[in-house]
């Protein structure tokens, strides 16, 4: 398979949770479609995009980042440290605090309004 002719993507520019350098073969989520794939000869292998794909002859079109070269410029230890730090940051996030408000008074039922007349 030949590369797609685009400039290589640096692994340091990819968020650590979309990259996996823990195994012998690096793996990453395709930046275009999110599909996970092992790098083959430093490239994202040809794949069809399941999401957001344009269909050609009833089949999903090939993802535009098929054959994208990826330059692994991060050491696995640095990547693991960045991943742990990202996990800690995510664990510290809180959802927006909801301020309870008083229950609004109930409106007088229509049949009581009609009976008062
Ligand atoms: Zn893709």
Image: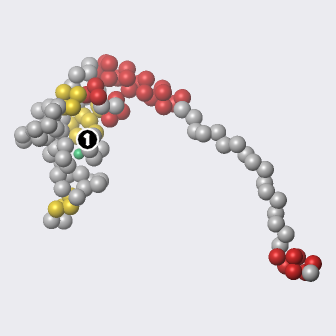
Can the viewer see residue 84? yes
Residue at image location 41% in from the left, 24% down from the top:
84
Residue at 26% from the left image edge and 19% from the top image edge: 75
Residue lying at 31% horizontally and 18% vertically, measured from the top left:
77
Report the front residue among 110 and 11: 110
Q: Nearer the viewer, residue 117 or 64?
A: 117
Q: SS of the residue at dot 1?
A: loop
Residue 80 placement: quadrant? top left
Label 1 CB sits under 8 Å from any ligand 1 atom: yes
Q: Give the farthest residue toward the left.
A: 2
* 34 displayed left or right of 88: left
Q: Position of residue 32 (x, y in %)?
A: 26, 44
Q: Quadrant of the N terminus?
A: top left
Residue 68 lies, with reference to residue 64, above or below; the image says: above
Residue 113 position in % (x across, y down): 87, 76
Q: With 42 as the anchor, is 35 left or right in this view?
A: right
Counting every numbered tag in the picture gives 1
Q: To which quarter of the image does residue 14 belong?
A: top left
Q: What residue is rendered at 23% in x and 40% in y?
A: 37
Q: Which residue is the extreme one toward the right?
A: 116
Across and down, in percent, residue 44 comes to 18, 39
Q: 93 above or below 56? A: above
Q: Which residue is mark 1?
A: 30
Seen in the picture, residue 79 relative to 115 is either above or below; the reply is: above
Q: Which quadrant of the figure shows ligand 1? A: top left
Tell me: 52 left or right of 59: right
Quarter containing the C terminus: bottom right
**Coloration mode:** secondary structure
Q: Residues within 10 Å of mark 1 (few under 14, many from 20)?
A: many
Q: Quadrant of residue 10?
A: top left
């Amino acid at each position: 398979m030949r590369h797609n002719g685009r400039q290589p993507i640096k692994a340091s520019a990819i968020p650590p949770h979309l990259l996996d350098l823990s195994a012998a073969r690096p793996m990453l989520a395709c930046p275009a479609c999110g599909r996970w794939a092992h790098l083959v000869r430093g490239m994202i292998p040809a794949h069809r995009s399941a999401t957001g794909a344009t269909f050609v002859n009833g089949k999903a079109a090939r993802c535009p980042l098929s054959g994208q070269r990826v330059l692994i410029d991060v050491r696995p230890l640095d990547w693991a440290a960045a991943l742990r730090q990202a996990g800690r940051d995510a664990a510290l996030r809180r959802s927006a605090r909801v301020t309870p408000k008083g229950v609004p008074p109930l409106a007088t039922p229509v049949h009581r309004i009609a009976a008062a007349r």
